[in-house]
C-alpha cells in the first residue's frame, strides 16, 4: 500500500540540487530510479564511494525532498533508508 511512482534523482558531485532545478540539465544526473509500490528501487549503475552526491526525491502530491552532500560508504551497501514524505 505504498506510494506509486516516487522518483529518485541522483545528481553528480559537481552540482547541487539548486543547480539542477535551475536548468533541468540531464547531463547533471548520475542516475534516475522510480520506486515500486513498496518504495524499493535500484540504481542502474555503480556509484562511487566517498563522493558527495546531491539527491532529489519527487512524488506526486507530496513536497519534494532534497539534500546535497549525500555520501555513500562501502559499509552502506545495500542502503536501507526510511524517507518520510509530507503532503504538499
Image (tube, rainbow, N blue to C red):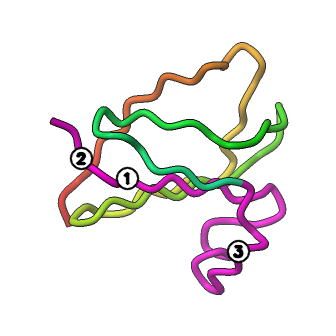
Which quarter of the rendered picture does the C terminus lie within? bottom left
In magenta segment, residue 5:
yes
Q: CA distance from mark 2 to mark 3?
A: 25 Å
Mark 3 surroundings: few (<14), some (14-19) or many (≥20) residues within 10 A:
few
Mark 1 surroundings: few (<14), some (14-19) or many (≥20) residues within 10 A:
many
Residue found farthest to the top: 75
Callout 3 touching callout 1 (CB < 8 Å): no
Identity of the residue drawn at 51% across and 52% down: 8
Residue 69 vs residue 80, the one in the foreground: 80
Callout 2 touching callout 3 (CB < 8 Å): no
Identity of the residue drawn at 49% across and 37% down: 41
Q: Quadrant of residue 5?
A: bottom left
Q: Is residue 59 left or right of residue 23?
A: left
Q: Position of residue 71 (x, y in %)?
A: 72, 37
In magenta segment, residue 47:
no
Identity of the residue drawn at 82% across and 31% down: 49
Checking the image for residue 85, the label placed there is: none
Is label 1 in a helix, a strand or a loop? loop
Q: Position of residue 80 (x, y in %)?
A: 49, 22
Name the residue tied to disc 1: 6
Checking the image for residue 3, the label placed there is: 2
- Tally of numbered tags: 3
Name the residue tied to disc 3: 26
Is label 2 in a helix, a strand or a loop? loop
Identity of the residue drawn at 28% across and 49% down: 85
Is label 3 in a helix, a strand or a loop? helix
Callout 1 touching callout 2 (CB < 8 Å): yes
Classify 20 as above or below 71.
below
Q: CA distance from mark 1 to mark 2?
A: 7 Å
- The segment highlighted magenta reads 1-30
Amino acid at each position: 500500500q505504498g506510494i506509486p511512482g516516487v522518483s529518485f534523482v541522483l545528481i553528480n558531485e559537481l552540482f547541487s540540487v539548486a543547480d539542477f532545478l535551475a536548468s533541468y540539465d540531464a547531463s547533471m544526473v548520475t542516475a534516475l530510479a522510480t520506486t515500486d509500490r513498496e518504495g524499493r528501487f535500484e540504481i542502474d549503475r555503480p556509484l562511487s564511494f566517498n563522493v558527495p552526491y546531491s539527491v532529489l526525491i519527487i512524488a506526486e502530491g507530496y513536497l519534494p525532498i532534497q539534500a546535497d552532500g549525500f555520501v555513500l560508504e562501502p559499509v552502506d551497501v545495500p542502503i536501507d533508508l526510511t524517507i518520510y514524505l509530507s503532503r504538499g
